[in-house]
Image (cartoon, rainbow, N blue to C red):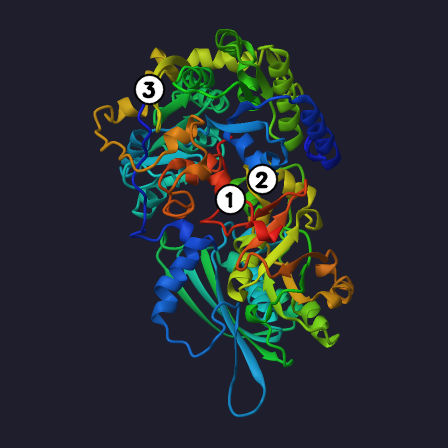
């Protein structure tokens, strides 16, 4: 084999165009955010790496949280939810992750020509039901129609405002060694539910999205007087991306135990089949909580009172070693890094 | 989950590790053939748990990694034609050709779609009669029967707008190429279980005999790999060189005769270029005569399409032959990362460099 050359092509060092991988919640998306948007926007607020902005409006001591998110899910309806429930709960949860009480939402619709009115009605009903369940009101909105072929049925944007009724600084910067990491439930349901519905993967029992509002259990943690350091929902990019973002922003390391993390049997089977790692799959009703280790037991006890967080458990701790990185202790006890994923996960060949 | 949890049982893994430690009396180098096995070894840290006498080298069994850049260039050229829908398995999309990858071709306007099965691509061709649907048929003997079935059905049903861009490769010729290379250190193989589920054990007997190497057909879970290693090391310690089957819950001695018959119906053995390695004689599958009309390279006149070739900026060819560990490469984790890969082995979900990057141990002071 001496005449074989060992060679490979030149790298794709810089992308000239946006690829789908830039939307996957991984490192490429962070390159896009810091390289394009954060570089251009002059924001006076410090916590740019958080789900919502928290600031005072006017002269009083009261603070508000403000956030926005866009929803482009396909198919529009999937087991456990639809684009409407997602658009309400996603924004409610971004406010909850700032420890805020969600109050008001806006709703913007970009509708593709030809979409059935009945579909929009169904989505609107879902949004109202989800808003009522989360205790928020949809108070303003906007609708645009684009030509057929220029949209995917409907895209929804919601923005949300909530009131901050605590004096904590709930942000990655508050995370420190000695904190416990509590994960609020089993992982990977939403991403696999949507993928199964989109690709028509017929599994024996349908996987249901975990899409749900998280404000109630979060506010209960605060009402119990727990010293919450940080909250992060485990959406796009899953647990691994969320923990990496916090590790990086806080400058601490995070060590988690694989055996403490739960994945439902159906989700696991689907992930095994497609070669996906459930730690990187999106959730829409799960979060990670950082607080002093001595309070972790009480936090789990508070969370276990709510159905959506009934599966909460301590999954790891913040450590002074390996700053900015996430270490996972696997089933055989060997430690390895859990890196931020590059783009989106792609199903493998075999 | 049945057949998974038993093979991830920590207590059983510890017992097998103890048995391996009790067995080895001298250094041995064993190659696991399949990239899926490499990832399991790194993910579970088996390489850190084995006795120091045992060295694992990682083999060429990553279908995405060995697909030549020229084939990817052709896939990109096809995707750029307005009448073509190019269908591919997902993890092919981020692998760079000579200049760009299929994901970038998609961003530039090409109609590239991820499918989970070649039969999904065939269904798409049946629905989109006005378009040309091309399936990028890559992989080892594992994926070949599914692709053969798509070709068979397309021809039987006269689906005239369906074709295949074929870059299939075979395992045994690659093992022979590795064993006959200068300075080869491999003394035994863990063969890829899923490949053997199709082919059976027969193709490996001549290799084991000619080169006097034990070959153990092995699964993909941590306990599979430890059991396969134990069988392979036992043979080495006893001076045997046989083909054994650890993965008997999936692999039968004769393989899958129906799949083999279909492969024979649709494909014939051809010389094939392997990315980073070069042309290996009789190491691939190409469409047989009655199926030539389904050959996308012929249909779209791509046989003459020139590729700029591959600049020698990456050592993945050495990695694929087990002659260089990913962590021994100077570019690893520096110029070369999954975001900005120098080569296919860093982006593929079965690539050895990606396995080392994704599952790298933390810094020593973190333990």
User: Would you say A316 lies left or right of B193 here?
Assistant: right
- Marks 3 and 1: in contact by CB < 8 Å? no
C-alpha distance separating marks 1 and 2: 8 Å
Residue position marked by numbered label 3 in the rendering? A2
User: The numbered mark 2 sits on a residue in which chain?
Assistant: B
For the N terminus of chain B, give its image quadrant: top right
Give x and y (percent) for residue A323: 54, 59
Left or right: A219, with A78 as reference point? right
Q: Which residue is mark 2?
A: B43
Q: Secondary structure at mark 1?
A: helix
- Chain letter belonging to callout 3: A
Q: Which residue is mark 1?
A: B358
Which residue: 63% across, 54% down? A255
Secondary-structure class at tag 2: helix
User: Residue under mark 1: which chain is it in?
Assistant: B
* Residue drawn at the location 69% of the way across and 42% of the way down: A265
Of A349 and A300, which appears nearest the observer? A300
Residue A83 visible, this orientation: yes
Q: Is residue B276 left or right of residue A143?
A: left
> Looking at the picture, does residue B262 appear above or below residue A77?
above
Q: Nearer the viewer, mark 3 or mark 2?
A: 3
Residue farthest along the front direction in this orientation: B26
**Residue at figure coordinates x 66%, y 18% from the top left:** B248
- Residue B183 drawn above or below residue A160: above
The image position of residue B280, as x and y in percent, is 35, 17
Label 3 crowd bin: few (<14), some (14–19), many (20+), radius 10 Å = few
Which of the two residues, B201 or B241, is positioned nearer the viewer here?
Answer: B241
Image spot of residue B361 (x, y percent): 55, 45
Cβ–Cβ under 8 Å for marks 1 and 2: yes
Question: Separation of disc 1 and disc 3 at Cα?
Answer: 31 Å
């Amino acid at each position: 084999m001496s005449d074989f050359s060992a060679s490979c092509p030149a790298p794709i060092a810089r992308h000239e165009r946006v690829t789908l991988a830039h939307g996957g919640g991984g490192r490429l998306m962070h390159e896009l955010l810091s390289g394009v948007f954060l570089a251009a926007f002059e924001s006076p607020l410090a916590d740019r790496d958080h789900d919502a902005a928290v600031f005072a409006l006017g002269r009083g001591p009261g603070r508000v949280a403000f956030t926005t998110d866009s929803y482009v899910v396909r198919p529009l309806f999937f087991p456990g939810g639809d684009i409407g429930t997602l658009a309400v709960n996603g924004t409610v949860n971004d406010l909850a992750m700032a420890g805020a009480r969600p109050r008001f939402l806006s709703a913007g619709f970009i509708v593709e020509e030809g979409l059935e009115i009945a579909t929009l009605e169904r989505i609107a009903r879902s949004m109202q039901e989800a808003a009522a369940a989360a205790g928020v009101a949809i108070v303003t909105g906007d609708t645009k129609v684009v030509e057929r072929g220029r949209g995917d049925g409907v895209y929804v944007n919601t923005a949300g405002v909530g009131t901050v009724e605590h004096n904590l600084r709930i942000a990655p910067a508050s995370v420190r060694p000695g904190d416990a990491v509590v994960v609020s439930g089993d992982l990977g349901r939403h991403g696999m539910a949507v993928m199964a519905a989109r690709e028509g993967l017929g599994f024996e029992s349908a996987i249901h999205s975990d899409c749900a509002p998280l404000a109630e259990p979060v506010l209960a943690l605060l009402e119990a007087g727990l010293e919450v350091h940080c909250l992060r929902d485990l959406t796009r990019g899953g647990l691994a991306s969320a923990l990496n973002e916090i590790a990086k922003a806080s400058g601490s390391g995070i060590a988690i135990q694989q055996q403490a993390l739960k994945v439902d049997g159906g989700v696991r089977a689907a992930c095994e089949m497609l070669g996906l790692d459930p730690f990187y799959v999106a959730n829409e009703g799960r979060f990670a909580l950082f607080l002093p280790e001595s309070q972790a037991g009480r936090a789990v006890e508070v969370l276990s009172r709510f159905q959506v967080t009934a599966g909460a458990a301590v999954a790891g701790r913040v450590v002074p070693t390996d700053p900015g990185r996430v270490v996972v202790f696997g089933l055989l006890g060997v430690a390895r890094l859990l890196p931020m994923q590059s783009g989106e996960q792609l199903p493998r060949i075999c | 989950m049945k057949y998974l949890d038993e093979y991830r049982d920590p207590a059983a893994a510890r017992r097998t590790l103890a048995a391996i430690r009790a067995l080895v009396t001298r250094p041995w180098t064993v190659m696991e053939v399949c990239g899926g096995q490499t990832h399991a070894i790194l993910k579970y840290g088996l390489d850190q748990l084995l006795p120091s006498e045992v060295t694992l080298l990682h083999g060429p069994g990553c279908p995405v990694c060995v697909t030549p850049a020229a084939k990817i260039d052709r896939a990109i050229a096809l995707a750029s034609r307005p009448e073509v829908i190019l269908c591919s398995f997902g993890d092919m999309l981020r692998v760079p050709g000579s200049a760009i990858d299929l994901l970038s071709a998609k961003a530039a306007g090409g109609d590239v779609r991820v499918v989970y099965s070649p039969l999904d691509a065939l269904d798409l061709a049946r629905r989109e009669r006005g378009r040309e649907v091309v399936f990028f048929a890559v992989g080892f003997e594992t994926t070949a029967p599914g692709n053969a079935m798509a070709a068979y059905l397309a021809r039987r049903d006269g689906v005239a707008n369906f074709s295949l861009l074929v870059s299939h490769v075979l395992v045994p010729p690659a093992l022979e190429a590795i064993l006959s290379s200068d300075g080869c250190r491999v003394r035994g193989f863990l063969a890829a279980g899923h490949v053997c589920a199709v082919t059976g054990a027969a193709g490996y007997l001549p290799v084991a005999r000619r080169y006097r190497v034990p070959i153990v057909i092995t699964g993909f879970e941590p306990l599979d790999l430890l059991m396969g290693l134990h069988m392979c090391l036992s043979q080495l310690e006893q001076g045997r060189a046989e083909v054994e089957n650890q993965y008997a819950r999936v692999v039968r001695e004769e393989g899958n005769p129906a799949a083999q018959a279909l492969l024979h119906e649709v494909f014939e053995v051809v010389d094939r270029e392997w990315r980073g390695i070069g042309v290996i004689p009789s190491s691939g599958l190409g469409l047989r005569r009655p199926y030539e009309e389904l050959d996308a390279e012929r249909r779209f006149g791509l046989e003459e399409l020139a590729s700029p070739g591959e600049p020698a900026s990456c050592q993945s060819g050495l990695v694929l032959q087990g002659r260089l560990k990913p962590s021994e490469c100077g570019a690893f984790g520096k110029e070369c990362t999954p975001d900005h890969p120098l080569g296919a082995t860093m982006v593929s979900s079965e690539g050895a460099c990606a396995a080392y990057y994704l599952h790298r141990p933390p810094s020593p002071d973190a333990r």
